[in-house]
Each structure stands twice: as structure tokens, then as C-alpha cells.
Amino acid sequence: MQKKIVYRVMADWDSETRRWTVTSDDIPGLVLETNTVEEIVDCLQEFAPELIEQNCDSDGLDIPIVLQANYATRLLKSGHA
């Protein structure tokens, strides 16, 4: 029986390019750039199973993923732009 593993995926917001950069130490070869969190999930659905099957000890059929999104911004008091 195969041990269940959770694959951790990091998404970092780049305020200059206004895009998410997505990587994972657990899924070798995973590097994505997207515009939205929804696109991250869509791309993971499309690309992660094959990468996991090729590079990890998994059949890629049942893949628990934890997505951690890091978003930093500045909030300005109204009227102080």
C-alpha cells in the first residue's frame, strides 16, 4: 500500500508583474506563472499529476495538495494616496 503524502505548493504574488509565481519543493519541475489563484488550481490540475508520476513515488491518481499563497500589499488611509 502506498503511503499518502501531502504535496506542498507555494504561490508568491509579485506586485510589479501582477502575477503569481508557483513552485514546490515536493513536486520537482513545478514552476508556474498565473494571473489568479483560480488559474493556479487549474494549472495544478493539468500539470501536477504528470510531474508527480514522473518525479515522485506516486501513481498521480490521488494527490493531496496544500497551496500556500503569499500576498503582500500596502494599505493606505483613505485620502492619502
Image: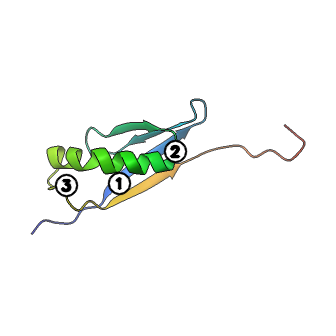
Q: Nearer the viewer, residue 33 or 12?
A: 33
First in sequence: mark 3 or mark 1?
Answer: 1
Q: Residue at x 39, y 49 (%)?
A: 42
Quarter of the image where the C terminus is located: top right
- Give the colour scheme shown: rainbow
**In which image quadrant can residue 67 be found?**
bottom left
Q: Position of residue 1 (x, y in %)?
A: 9, 69
SS at circle 2: loop
Which disc, if any, is residue 44?
none
Percent from the top left, x then y, of residue 47?
Answer: 29, 44
Q: What amino acid type is highlighted by mark number 2?
A: Thr
Secondary structure at numbered mark 3 = loop
The label nearer to you, 2 versus 1, is: 2
Quadrant housing residue 16: top right
Task: Judge left or right: residue 42 versus residue 73.
Answer: left
Inspect this view and state whether residue 26 appears.
no
Numbered tag placed on residue 36 in the rendering? 2
- Residue at left offset 26%, top offset 59%: 63
Tell me the residue at 35%/37% (across/down).
Answer: 31
Instruction: Assess disc 2: are there few (<14), some (14-19) or many (≥20) residues with their C-alpha within 10 Å of its C-alpha.
Output: few
Q: From this view, report whether residue 46 is shown above or below residue 2.
A: above
Residue 23 visible somewhere in the drawing: yes
Q: CA distance from mark 2 to mark 3?
A: 24 Å
* Residue, disc 1: 8
Which residue: 35% across, 54% down? 8
Q: Nearer the viewer, residue 32 or 27?
A: 32
Are the residues tagged 2 and 3 within 8 Å (C-beta)? no
Type of amino acid at the residue the image marks with label 1: Arg
Under mark 3, the amino acid is Gly
Marker disc for residue 60: 3
